[in-house]
Image (cartoon, rainbow, N blue to C red):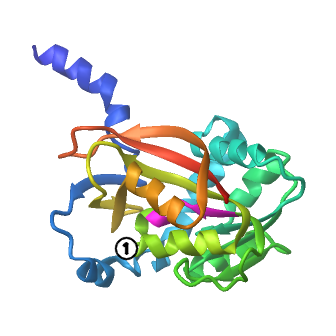
Amino acid sequence: MKTIKNIAKKILSPFLRRPKGVSHGYRIIENPDRDALRERYNAVWQDISIPQKQLEITEKQLPGFHNTGPMKAAVDLLRKTGLAHPGVLEIGCSTGYYYDVFKKAGLDVAYEGCDYSEEFIKVARQKHPGVQFKVSNALALDYRDSQFDIAISGCCILHIIDYPKAIAETARVAKTWTVFHRTPVVHMRQTTYAKKIGYDIEMLEILFNEEELFGLFAKNGLAVHSVNTHGQFFVPGIAEPVFMKSYLCKKI
């Protein structure tokens, strides 16, 4: 019996957790107090240790980006827009590594990036001279209405307590298309707040009920055009898998 359990654990373990050092140790937050969560977690991603840790991972992934689910998903969704040389804003751009992904994929885009972390933007500018990067908050973007053909919310809203506002801001600065990239979703339970360890730091992750998410898209004049599912994992206390999805939405 012990041997069978060990074999099962070995087979299933890649699906039950993400690699340690990226995201692990999930614990559901029961009866979340949003004010307390803002105070505890809003500044976590400004930690100056995170950019270098993330950079070490993404630089290893870039040569084989077409075999990395989230990177391939972003490329595939941008291609589905059918736009020639679109202006693209990535919100929550981190070190700007998706600029490299799009370039390697041969996508002809006019890319700009923003992040609320000064350290991330500092690294992005060092690595990509000549590309426009700006420190800007996803809840109050420093850009004009409809300024970009495509606005990408890059693995961003899952860390934002006021995610309805972040979705609205993404829609506001987009002219035609939005991408909500690397979004963790559940289907049978309500939107759930969890704390986890990411890059060796305790942080918040929001697991979205997909129906609620679609309602927020519709509220902001966004119609879901395409969905790319590129991963799944399990969180203790949640019976269903959490799926990682990227959504391509068109403004209507």
Can the viewer see residue 201 in this picture? Answer: no
Assign the C terminus to one quadrant of the image: bottom right
Identify the magenta region. 151-157
Q: Nearer the viewer, residue 83 or 238?
A: 83
Within 10 angstroms of label 1, few (less than 14), some, or many (20 or more) residues?
Answer: some
Question: Compared with residue 232, is residue 164 higher up or lower down, i.e. above or below?
Answer: below
Q: Residue at x 46, y 45 (%)?
A: 244
Does the magenta portion include 172?
no
To which residue does mark 1 refer? 161
Q: Secondary structure at mark 1?
A: loop
Q: Nearer the viewer, residue 159 or 202?
A: 159
Does the magenta portion include 152?
yes
Assign the N terminus to one quadrant of the image: top left
Q: Residue at x 36, y 61 (%)?
A: 205
Q: Residue at x 65, y 78 (%)?
A: 121
Residue 236 sits in quarter: top left
Q: Position of residue 50 (x, y in %)?
A: 49, 69
Classify residue 237 as left or right of residue 203.
left
Residue 221 sits in quarter: bottom right
Q: Nearer the viewer, residue 239 or 176?
A: 176
Classify residue 197 as left or right of residue 118.
left
Question: Amino acid under label 1?
Answer: Ile
Q: Position of residue 215 (x, y in %)?
A: 45, 58
Q: Position of residue 29 (x, y in %)?
A: 20, 63
Classify residue 63 as left or right of residue 210.
right
